[in-house]
Amino acid sequence: MITREDVLKLAALSRLRLSDDEVFKMQSDMTAILSYIDILKAAHGSHHGPVMTRNKNVMREDGNGHESGMYTDALMNLAPKSEKTSEGVYLKVKRILGSSQ
């Protein structure tokens, strides 16, 4: 169990001023959190296999895909600014960060 002194020491290290009610609530909350962590540790150490054994893939199977690049030109024409180079097609966007050079 977390003691009142533990909470006060942690508050001092965190540079927090806590009222008596806040200290009591924090003590209770921290004790509950650590108790829950103990439960999780015990569940992880059990020999019953993985906890998530009932999960299954609920995603649909991919159907017949389209040819790569089939819609590139149509999508790029919708963009405000784009550029076609020998390396490919790129969207032009406003510069956000300054150069570090």
Image (cartoon, rainbow, N blue to C red):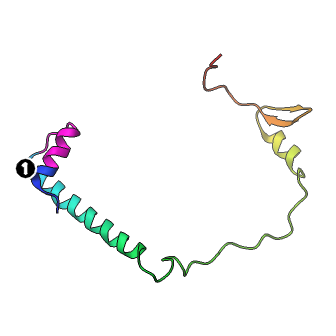
Q: Residue furthest left?
A: 20
Which residue sits at x=32%, y=66%? 37
Question: How many numbered marks are there?
Answer: 1
User: Quick check: 8 above or below 34?
Assistant: above
Of the residues shown, which amino acid type is indicated by label 1?
Asp
Magenta part of the chain: 7-18
Quadrant assignment, res 88? top right
Q: Position of residue 71 (x, y in %)?
A: 86, 50
Kind of element beneath mark 1: helix
User: Quick check: 94 above or below 7?
Assistant: above
Which residue sits at x=45%, y=81%? 47
Asked if residue 13 lies left or right of residue 59, the reply is: left
Which residue sits at x=62%, y=19%? 100
Q: Which residue is mark 1?
A: 20
Which residue sits at x=89%, y=31%? 85
The image quadrant where one finds the C terminus is top right
Quadrant assignment, res 27? bottom left
User: Quick check: 95 above or below 47?
Assistant: above
Q: Position of residue 49 (x, y in %)?
A: 50, 80
User: Within 10 angstroms of label 1, few (less than 14), some, or many (20 or more) residues?
Assistant: few
Q: Is residue 13 magenta?
A: yes
Q: Position of residue 21 (x, y in %)?
A: 9, 52
Q: Residue furthest top?
A: 101
The image quadrant where one finds the N terminus is bottom left
Question: Which one is nearer the viewer's eye here, 73 or 11?
Answer: 11
Asked if residue 45 lies left or right of residue 10, the reply is: right
Q: Is residue 72 magenta?
A: no
Q: Position of residue 16 (x, y in %)?
A: 19, 39
